[in-house]
Amino acid sequence: MKTILITGIGGLTPRSIALIIREHHPDYKLIGCDIEKKAMGFFMEGLLDEYYIAPGSDSPEYFPWIERLVREKHIDYAFVEPEAEIVEWGDYYEK
């Protein structure tokens, strides 16, 4: 079984990604996160196995939080959205 993290789960694209994965790989564990505690993806029945409220990607706490989540939940893959978050991941990778 694979464990997949989907960030920005309140957005349409991340929710669509989760739905497609759920449809084609029902045995995968899906973990969603978002900075908004009322993110729509948190409330869609059957969409996620676990969800978390994340710090903003521009926060100094963000990458330590992500790294801890990846380690503790044994995350295999991540889909990162929205674009501002993708840019932060790219910058972090370059460092």
Image (cartoon, grey):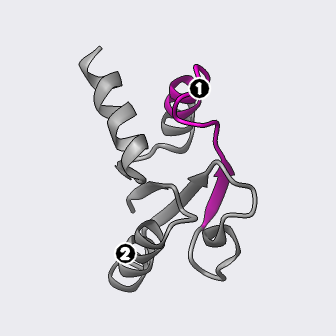
- Magenta includes 19? no
Kindly give the residue lying farthest to the top in the view shown: 95
Question: Front-most of 21 and 44?
Answer: 44
Could you tell me residue 34's position as x and y percent?
60, 52
Whole-number angstrom distance, CA of label 1 to CA of label 2: 29 Å
Q: Is residue 16 above or below residue 67?
A: below
- Amino acid type assigned to the residue bearing label 2 in the image: Ile
- Amino acid type assigned to the residue bearing label 1 in the image: Ser
Question: Which numbered dot is residue 21?
Answer: 2
Q: Is residue 90 above or below residue 51?
A: above
Residue at position x 42%, y 42% in the image: 85
Quadrant of the frame with the C terminus: top left
Kindly give the residue lying farthest to the front in the view shown: 84
Looking at the image, residue 14 sits to the left or right of residue 58; the answer is left
Residue at position x 42%, y 68% in the image: 28
Residue at position x 33%, y 36% in the image: 87
Looking at the image, residue 42 sits to the left or right of residue 59; the answer is right
Number of numbered tags placed on the structure image: 2
Q: Which residue is mark 1?
A: 59
